[in-house]
Image (cartoon, rainbow, N blue to C red):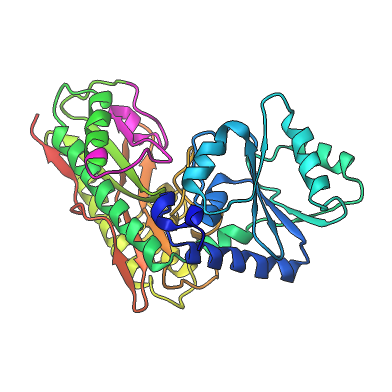
Amino acid sequence: MPAEISKENMGLHFTVDEYRRRVKGVQAEMAKRGIDVLMVNHLENIYYLSGFRTVGYYSFMALFVPVEGEPVHFTRLIEKTTLQGTSWIPDRELYPDTENYNDATIRVINERGWAKARIGIDKSAWYLTIDDYEKMQARLPQAKFVDGSMIVENLRLIKSPAEQEFSRQAGNAASEGMRSAIDALRNGITEDDLMAAAYQGLFKMHSEYPGLPPLINAGVRHTMAHAMAEGYPVKTGDAVYFEVGASIKRYHAATLRIGYVGAAPKLFQDLTDLCRRSIEAGLKEMKPGNPAELVDQAARKVIEDGGYGDKFRHKAGYSIGIALPPDWSEARTMMLRGGEKRPLQPGMVFHFLPAVFEYAQYGVGLSETVLVTETGYEILTNVEQKLFEVKP
């Protein structure tokens, strides 16, 4: 193996052989779909295939994967050193800031002999705009653009043993971030202070920045799904929503708990128990071979039987793994929801989160990150499943 692509001197998170196996898996699916070259635009997918990671994904970049041979990086010239330090792939096409990236893309496709090829694109990629796509179509009239969506994502669903270890570490980090935030909860503290405590726990466990910041909201705002901390001061009698995610080598895990300053009303205790029993029921169906929808159905039935079915307004869970902002999930690839009949397989990882919401009244839930194993499941997060009441 050439020294420049060895795991030891590249800072790679996996062996080069593992990256090559991933590329071969993509190429096999490309051959089935009749794709000559796949243009990969999601940085999560580029990272999965190459190891390349950067915060510069706001600029246009791609990984071109031919149906045979090795991939080619395409990105800004400023990223050259990051490519050299993170990716095992030595073939690089770099464009300076004085060259329009659309012009550079067309230039590379022409120079590589792909102007008449069947080019696979991801029509759902956030970083391939309608404008970019239309310009490529107009300037490459002999190319045939075909949908290559979800080729890489579907391979990412099943995590290798090495990937699973990063997910375990992320589960430990998310749990420590949660405990750190809950330990800081008291009368008079602000949401921002709780965020700081969560980050302290995360970074202490070597988490990188997660795809989503912690979701920490107090008072009436705890009933607002996906609200963010805004400095609200916590008062006695306030419930606090904590959802904390961690990233280890970009592999994520997350967990959800509810805190309460003072003695919580019986309703909050009852709803917490309802969600706990919902998780318990769903986990009984979390085993290889079962259609994913069975987990949702089992978890949802508990909530419905408890009289809160109309307050459980989301899927029961979603695949979680490699992620960058603005999300920490792989939900676009697979969810635990009704109608998802694909079978669970060993190596899949899900964030499983039954919760019920009613504005200005309650927002209660519990969640775990769960790995599907050969015989069942392994819970990767480890915070006690309860409502956390703290003295004022």
Q: Position of residue 31 (x, y in %)?
A: 73, 69
In the visual, does 279 lie left or right of 121? left
Nearest the viewer among 364 and 231 is 231
Say whether residue 160 is magenta. Answer: no
Q: Position of residue 110 (x, y in %)?
A: 83, 46
Q: Residue furthest left?
A: 391
In the visual, does 50 lie left or right of 138? left
- For the question of whether residue 340 can be seen, the reply is no
- Check the picture and name the quadrant holding the C terminus: top left
Q: Residue at x 41, y 51 (%)?
A: 9
Q: Residue at x 69, y 40 (%)?
A: 128
In the visual, does 237 lie left or right of 27? left
Q: Position of residue 144 (x, y in %)?
A: 85, 54
In the visual, does 44 lie left or right of 317? right
Q: Residue at x 42, y 76 (%)?
A: 288
- For the question of whether residue 164 can be seen, the reply is yes
Q: Say if 294 sits above or below 60 in the image.
A: below
Nearest the viewer among 161 and 67 is 67
Say whether residue 216 is magenta. Answer: yes
Q: Which residues are magenta?
A: 203-230
Nearest the viewer among 91 and 116 is 91
Q: Position of residue 198 (x, y in %)?
A: 25, 36
